[in-house]
Image (cartoon, grey):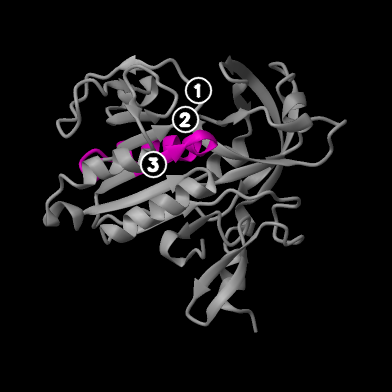
Amino acid sequence: MTTAAQQKAQQNRSTVFVEVGKLSSVERLPGDQFILRIRAPKCAAAARPGSFVHLTCDPAAPMRRPLSIMRVVDDCIEILYKIVGEGLQRLSEKKPGDTISILGPIGHPFRPSPERPKALLIGGGVGIPPMIFIADSLRQQPDTWTPLAILGSEIPFPFARQRSQLATPWLSNAIIDTMPLLEGWGVPCRLATLSGMDGCFDGYVTDLAEQWLSTLSAQDLAKTQIFSCGPTPMLKAVAALAEKYDLPCQVSLEEFMACAVGGCGGCTVVIKTPEGEAMQRVCVDGPVFDAASVVW
């Protein structure tokens, strides 16, 4: 008999495709960062906020690389990544019109709870893309959700920062920079860094998040939930913040992985379950987990 964990891991296998995607556009950004738009209709149709793809960078680097989906545009997916290693270096050399083998979308997505419409989205570094995806999903239901995004980076942000016109009365007027895409969607966003960028909060994303949370009434906190993706130390701090304010929190974990389909077991993490602590695979059991269940 299959266990509950096995059943969960199998739930999304019918919506994972191997697809030859065609590179539609390449945008190079400061800090060796890139946004790729890839035409992949099957993957685009099945992708959900928190999904990722496992793609082949180049025949000379045959091991696939796991990369988060930043958003879906028509029948295309957008991927934001930073060059780390030979594989992603070779991927950065691709040109529009080139083809890329894609396995995806993979993983269990974020699961927003409608009874908590105040969604706090916290993204750091390469954890920014899933926050863009969930913001895009939530902002399409403006009568239901009121998302707030807090993004952090210690290298140049993967977008041209602009001054926001969306009010954040809980914050100093000097902290005014935002992501243009989110601004255009009407999603309030503020940026945090330790790199001294003008217009950004000088500190960690969790410090900035707590500034907002500390202004909320008990009634508003009861309507708030957190979604986050980023480096493990950041996620651990986000989980602690959620515990402090007694808020539900979902985190998308980042781990090295080889197969991305649950076979190799190279991306396991320790998760608390009703039966006790257990090893679960980030690729098929996650990548999204309840923050309180993760053994940090």
Residue 42 shown left or right of residue 230 in the figure? right
Residue 224 highlighted magenta (yes or no): no
Where is the N terminus found, in terms of image quarters?
bottom right
* Residue that numbered label 1 is attached to: 158
- 10 Å neighbourhood of mark 1: few (<14), some, or many (≥20)? many
Give the distance between the C-alpha atoms of the residues marked 1 and 3, in whole angstroms. Answer: 15 Å
Q: As rendered, which of 127 and 194 lies closer to the eye?
A: 194
Please give the range of residues in magenta: 121-146
Drawn side of residue 197 relative to residue 96, left or right? left
**N-terminal of the two: label 2 or label 3?**
3
At horizontal 38% and vertical 23% (from top left) the residue drawn is 179
Q: Which residue is mark 3?
A: 122
Q: Residues within 10 Å of mark 3 (few under 14, many from 20)?
A: many
Residue bearing mark 2: 153
* Mark 3 residue type: Ile
Give the residue drawn at x 84%, y 34%. 61
